[in-house]
Image (cartoon, helix red, strand yellow):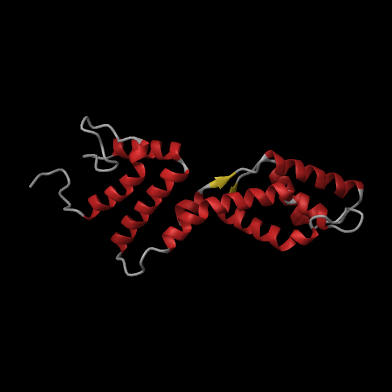
Amino acid sequence: MALQEQETFSPPAAMKAAVRQGARWREEFDVRTPDKAVRFGQRILEGRAFTLKEVKDLRTWFRRNARWKDTPPDKGMGGTCWRLMGGDAGWAWTEKILDEHADLAEALAELPDDLDEDQSVVEALAVIFQWVARKMPLAAEDLMTRLHESQDPPVFPPCTDDGEPQGLDDFEESGMLWREAAYADPDLDGDA
């Protein structure tokens, strides 16, 4: 999962608006909130990106603290902290990101444990290529072109007769074709 862990996500404007409201409440009502919530809110306001692990941790925080999200600032710190952490918009953002990434994690988790190291890499890459084609079509198209340009001879993605990468519609299938090519005779350029 190292590739997935390197992906980062920037907080949306609605999270920043929630943080600003939390900061106003904190000042106006003299709400004593944990320093961690204040630092976290500052990070959101600065627009610093989050790793997938940090998004998972934030979702856990939202789920654990949802019961206090509507606490008025004059009755306790729950509602203020909720907003400093990104509010309802932040919770929805974390859920959306993790829902989009769940199917990839599940697919990778279903790979058989008895594969040798080379087989594991090939199978994992095939699953990842198929997922990219469904979830990030523009990135998939870019990846196809880069892979095609970097290989000599080009093996993946499959090419048309004139040597150009096949279209995006073929990308998901190409994950399966790439897997087949990786397991085929190592002499991929046809020399005997």
Relative depth, front residue between 127 and 37: 127
Q: Position of residue 8 (x, y in %)?
A: 55, 46
153, above or below 162, in the image: below
Image point (56%, 53%), residue name: 99
Q: Residue at x 42, y 59 (%)?
A: 108
Name the residue at 36% across, 38% down.
169
Q: Is residue 184 left or right of residue 69?
A: left
Q: Residue furthest bottom?
A: 114
The reply, left or right, for residue 136 in relation to residue 11 is left
Farthest top residue? Answer: 162
- The residue shown at (33%, 61%) is 120
Image location of residue 188, percent across then percent down: 17, 46
Quadrant in the rendering for residue 46: top right
Residue positioned most to the front? 169
Left or right of 171 in this view: 191? left
Residue 93, position as x, y percentages in the image: 64, 48
Q: How many marks?
A: 0
> Residue pushed farthest left?
192
In the shown orientation, is residue 32 left or right of residue 168? right
**Residue 133 drawn at (x, y percent):** 41, 43
